[in-house]
Image (tube, helix red, strand yellow):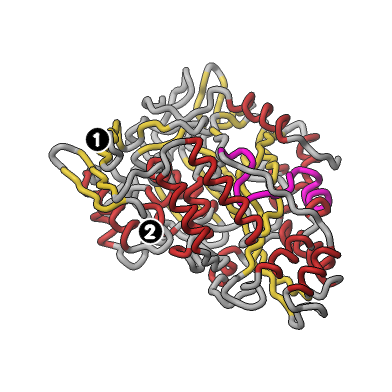
Amino acid sequence: MKRFISLMLALVMMFAMLAGCAKEETPTTAAPAGDTTTAAGTDTTQSTEGKKIRTDLVICQMADVVTLDPPESTDSYSNTVINLVFDTLIDLDADSQYIPGLAESWEVSEDGMEIVFKIRENVKFHNGEILKPSDVKFSFDRAKDEIAQSKAMFVSVEEILCDNDAMTVTLKMKEPSAAILTNLTEGACHIQNEKFAKEHPEDLNQVACGTGPMVLDEWKINDYVMLKRFDEHWAGQPVATSIKIRVIPEPTSRTIALEAGEIDWLAGVNSIDIARVMENENLKTMEVPGSSIVYIAPNQNREPWNNKLVRQALHHAADKATMIEVVYEGYALPGESPFPNIMPFWKSNPVEFNLEKAKALLAEAGYPDGLGREIELGVSSDERNRMAQILQSDCAKIGIDIKIELMEFGALMEHCDGNHDLIMLGWGHATNQDRTMRMNFHSSTIGANGNRAWCNNPEIDRLIDEGAVEMDQEKREAIYHELQDLMADETPWIPLLQQITVYGMNKNLEGIEWYKRGGGYYANGYVIEE
């Protein structure tokens, strides 16, 4: 049944469902209370309080992993695996509060120019090596100096020091940073084993060695990734003995697999299938206000997208309400900013659907008869293809002839080479204002793996830089509000919608943790068997 859901109602539902779901900083138990476990890989049927549980989970996502190398990853599909295979120094709980990870504690100097992390002792990597501060330094130096996709995360860091005897890592700062601790919880900052990385210098995108709760067992491209439990995880043995992450691009096929019991958890039910999943007595659902913004990025490296009036015209030609109703069955909110509205410092800047306004802007930009050439729009899913078709139909009325190119997600990433016209993607780092702005709009990150809009605006750069270092929250909020107002005018993105995601799962699935900022933690999941 088609419907529009208020954000407040969705938030209330989510908070109620998430009560008590934070990933604990204290060691986890091997399994739920009363469990009698067997060795990993021998028997996945366990018991808890007289009930049998299954601990070999199968989850599903729409696209394959792009890379297993943490600092090179900028997509959620890769991060699903990376977050299970690797750990970070610090983490965020379900309420986005900092908690210890591989660092058991940390201290920030009074002037904010030095941060000292105390590293846990006797933490094992999957290859048996013991975690050393030098592994942390290696990981951070590589992300900071060698990998284009992650350099922005360390823009405020001058130097990284380590002391293996004292078990400390020290960040020497160029300037105080309001963003650095949040950055260290991101995918790019997962800790790799230095020895393993140096043994595999050319294929770290395909192999992995971390300290995380799961070990990479097999990756069959465009089919599945198989993870096995790491029994010696520093936080305690995980509940799940294995997690298979299946790749099913076609949305209805994902739903059918869920209904057939082939998968236990579906990361986003296709909107047209939500009603039937909700009516299935063997399944249950969870609604979460999405942290991801679906957007179109015009490539400002190419005419006519270097003219903001043309970008504004495209924005006025985007019928967001129809996209939400037709494609998402009402399970979305109109995009009004590069930030989702669950993010601190969000500011509403709605843009009306108005083809006459769009046509007038094109004429003012020097295109009274339309753009005069075919415009390519790259998309990578059925839902976004349908959204693109709605845009295509409306744009044809004002002289913008759009050709839709549907391609596999990894191919779309490679397509963003600076010679493209338009791409439709999603962005979901909802607790990190600096990363959202710096990675997507700062001139220092221009390129296929970051600023795919080729945005190069000194005033945007200035506000991004100021927001990253301002420690006063009221002043920081004012900076981000000014930045969002500027971007509403410059239109480096056309924010289309913020999806309200409905997750489908086996009715007996328990133990999966979901965070308000988006993203899930699957290592303690299990299915109660009837």
Looking at the picture, tell me which residue is in the foreground, 374 or 471. 471
Most distant residue in the bottom direction: 372
Relative height, residue 296 to residue 398 (above, below): above
Looking at the picture, how far across and down is residue 500, in whole percent? 70, 41
* Residue labelled with disc 2: 151
Residue numbers of the magenta segment: 323-344
Looking at the picture, how far across and down is residue 40, in whole percent? 41, 37
Q: Is residue 14 left or right of residue 391?
A: left
Looking at the picture, how far across and down is residue 238, in whole percent? 43, 33
Image quadrant occupied by the C terminus: top right
Regarding mark 2 in the picture, which secondary structure is present there?
helix
Regarding mark 1 in the picture, which secondary structure is present there?
strand
Circle 1: residue type: Lys
Disc 2 to disc 1, how far (Cα)? 24 Å
Looking at the picture, tell me which residue is in the foreground, 385 or 493. 493
Q: Is residue 399 left or right of residue 216?
A: right
* Residue labelled with disc 1: 118
